[in-house]
């Protein structure tokens, strides 16, 4: 029986993941045409490659349908409430860096911290009759971050894309999104709160704690982990 | 684990017991409009309740409790005074503890009565205590009203009091605000720079979004005003600290609170209400000399209670949530009453947990 490794099925994340494994003597490649989501593995015994959407990899790891998977910390933490019980980080891959941050209009000169945001949220609700809206796709992480930061009177609005534009469009007052350089934020006249870093994310190799492992698989996993550890 | 049929049978028996005590049986829908619950509890309710939706009615929640729909029903067309009882499932989304039930049966008893608040509180507590007899539970009691009165009576600005009252249910944030208003926390550099600037909005980025320039200016002037306000005194701060730490049997707690009232005289009427409640509980046969009172009880989880609060716990089973909880929620009737209001107190118990404890008993 083979160990199943899930890797993002397209784009730079796939290419960089392939390169990372390549440096460790494990050659991953997509088999057949560009449209086919099957892969081949050379350079190590008993590992099979599954090309999946990066967003589905946390779920597959938690369900134990794959033994290993590459995806961002942000997606694991957002999608798996009990992530520490379900998966273990094997290695940070050193690319795909992105910070999940909370940002407000740069014109809000009176707002620098969560503490300010909470006070503004109270005044905003009194003035406008509804809660201050935060646009994001990371509902769980943002809700827990704001709650533990003592912010009351906020409402999350779902935004699956172009989140930085929601403030100007008046569908939200603040945003929480992934940023790598901050340029998009500046271009949209937004600023990050000084204590507004919710999570630092990067592409990470995870091991499922729940995927079934017989003795043969355990040996293969040990060999795989050794190979990962000795390289570079 | 008790079976579902067994739990429902126990629930029906408990409801019959409350009916015999004079309550009318009521039913509420399982699907509740999400908007109202979101408005009352804020975004956090999404983490605790199941939200669903359809294209016609929009977002709905699986009933996370009965109190809100029962209050709504009473405020819409209830006669006074009123006593209600109900039983059925409530649904709580669990994201952190897989051991906690996401669906369980509650039985409740709610009293809407203007005549004698202390007697109504004692009635609810005593009825629930009697229903739990034999399970050897520890009762915890508290009173959010005393804390609110203490904040209301502080010698400080209304704005600070409003900020503190808004966070009574968030102890960590409450403490941080208190430290700041008492001048114990240094002013953050960004705030200091803002206050020092002649025209803080000079050179600011373009105004975008719904929050306007006037709102930003209003907050800056509020911050300037606050910076000029004297700190909350050490005397009041330490009295508030003593108050929050009161954790004694009721008669001793009453003594401690009277001491605190020397520095926070505005809690006097709330203490008188506590005293009247203890007398009413004693008249109902509750052993008040052995009853625990914690001034901070109910601050973390019971957001709509604003006076008397209580819970019953199985002492040898820290893994179990409280078997019964309840309290006074006058402010909730005001929020849902569209101008009307009525003193209200109630409690719920969990027959499933009662059966679990009985099964485990030797």
Image: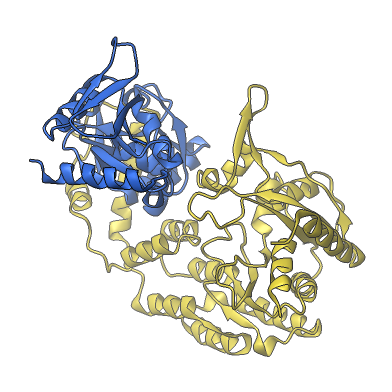
In the picture, which quadrant includes the C terminus of chain B? bottom right
Residue at 61%, 79% (x, y): give it.
B271
Question: Is residue A164 toward the left or the right of residue A91 in the image?
Answer: right
Chain painted in yellow in the figure: B
Is residue B344 visible from the viewing direction of this image? Answer: no
Percent across and percent down for residue B200 are 21, 40
Percent across and percent down for residue B142 are 60, 74
Chain painted in blue in the figure: A
Residue at 33%, 51% (x, y): give it.
A115
Percent across and percent down for residue B137 are 67, 78
Residue B12 in the image: above or below residue A224? below
Report the coloring of the rendering: by chain
How many marks are shown on the rendered structure?
Answer: 0
Residue A91 in the image: above or below residue A55? below
Residue at 54%, 43% (x, y): give it.
B46
Residue A207 in the image: above or below residue B228? above
Foreground pick, A44 / B1: A44
- State the image quarter where residue B81 is shown: bottom right
Percent across and percent down for residue B86 are 81, 55
- State the image quarter where residue A178 is shown: top left
- State the image quarter where residue B297 is shown: bottom right
In the picture, which quadrant includes the N terminus of chain B? bottom right
Foreground pick, B257 / B153: B257
Is residue B257 visible from the viewing direction of this image? Answer: yes
Residue at 63%, 40% (x, y): give it.
B36
Foreground pick, B205 / A68: A68
**View extreme (left): residue:** A232
């Amino acid at each position: 029986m083979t160990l199943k490794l899930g890797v993002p099925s397209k784009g730079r994340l796939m290419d960089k993941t392939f390169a990372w494994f390549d440096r460790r003597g494990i050659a991953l490649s997509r088999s057949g045409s560009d449209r086919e989501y099957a892969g081949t593995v050379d350079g190590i015994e008993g590992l099979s490659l599954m090309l999946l959407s990066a967003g589905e990899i946390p779920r597959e790891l938690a369900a134990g349908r794959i033994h290993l998977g590459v995806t961002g910390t942000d997606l694991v933490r957002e999608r798996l409430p009990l992530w520490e019980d379900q998966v273990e980080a094997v290695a940070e891959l050193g690319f795909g860096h992105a910070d999940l941050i909370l940002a407000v209009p740069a014109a809000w000169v009176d707002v620098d911290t969560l503490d300010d945001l909470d006070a503004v949220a109270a005044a905003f609700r009194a003035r406008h009759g509804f809660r201050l809206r935060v646009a994001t796709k990371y509902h769980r992480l943002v809700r827990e971050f704001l709650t533990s930061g003592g912010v009351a009177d906020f409402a999350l609005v779902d935004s699956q894309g172009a989140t930085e534009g929601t403030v100007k469009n008046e569908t939200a007052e603040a945003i929480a999104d992934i940023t790598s350089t901050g340029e998009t934020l500046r271009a949209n006249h937004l600023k990050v709160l000084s204590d507004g870093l919710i999570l630092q994310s990067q592409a990470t190799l995870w091991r499922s704690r729940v995927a079934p492992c017989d003795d043969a698989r355990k040996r293969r996993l040990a060999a795989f982990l050794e190979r990962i550890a000795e390289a570079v | 684990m008790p079976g579902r049929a067994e739990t429902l049978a126990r629930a029906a028996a408990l409801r019959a017991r409350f009916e015999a005590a004079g309550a009318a049986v009521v039913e509420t829908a399982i699907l509740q409009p999400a908007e109202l619950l979101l408005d009352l509890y804020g975004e956090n309710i999404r983490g605790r309740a199941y939200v669903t939706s359809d294209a016609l009615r929009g977002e709905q929640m699986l009933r996370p409790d009965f109190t809100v729909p029962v209050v709504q029903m009473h405020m819409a067309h209830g006669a006074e005074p009123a006593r209600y009882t109900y039983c059925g499932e409530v649904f709580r989304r669990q994201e952190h503890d897989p051991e906690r039930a996401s669906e369980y049966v509650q039985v409740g008893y709610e009293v809407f009565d203007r005549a004698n608040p202390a007697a109504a509180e004692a009635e609810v507590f005593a009825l629930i205590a009697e229903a739990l007899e034999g399970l050897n539970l520890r009762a915890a009691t508290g009173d959010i009203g005393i804390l609110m009165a203490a904040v209301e009576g502080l010698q400080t600005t209304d704005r600070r009091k409003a900020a503190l009252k808004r966070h009574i249910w968030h102890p960590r944030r409450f403490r941080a605000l208190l430290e700041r208003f008492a001048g114990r926390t240094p002013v953050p550099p960004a705030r200091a720079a803002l206050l020092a600037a002649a025209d803080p909005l000079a050179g600011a980025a373009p105004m975008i979004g719904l929050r306007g320039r006037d709102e930003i200016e209003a907050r800056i002037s509020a911050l300037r005003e606050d910076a000029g306000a004297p700190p909350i005194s050490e005397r009041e701060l330490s009295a508030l600290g003593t108050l929050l730490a009161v954790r004694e049997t009721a008669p001793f707690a009453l003594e401690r609170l009277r001491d605190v009232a020397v520095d926070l005289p505005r809690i006097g009427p709330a203490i008188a209400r506590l005293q009247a409640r203890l007398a009413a509980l004693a008249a109902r046969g509750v052993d008040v000399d052995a009853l625990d009172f914690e001034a901070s009880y109910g601050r973390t989880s019971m957001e709509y209670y604003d006076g008397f609060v209580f819970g019953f716990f199985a002492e040898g089973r820290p893994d179990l949530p409280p078997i019964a909880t309840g309290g006074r929620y006058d402010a909730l009737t005001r929020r849902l009453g569209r101008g009307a209001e009525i003193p209200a107190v109630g409690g719920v118990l969990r027959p499933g947990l009662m059966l679990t404890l009985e099964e485990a008993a030797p």
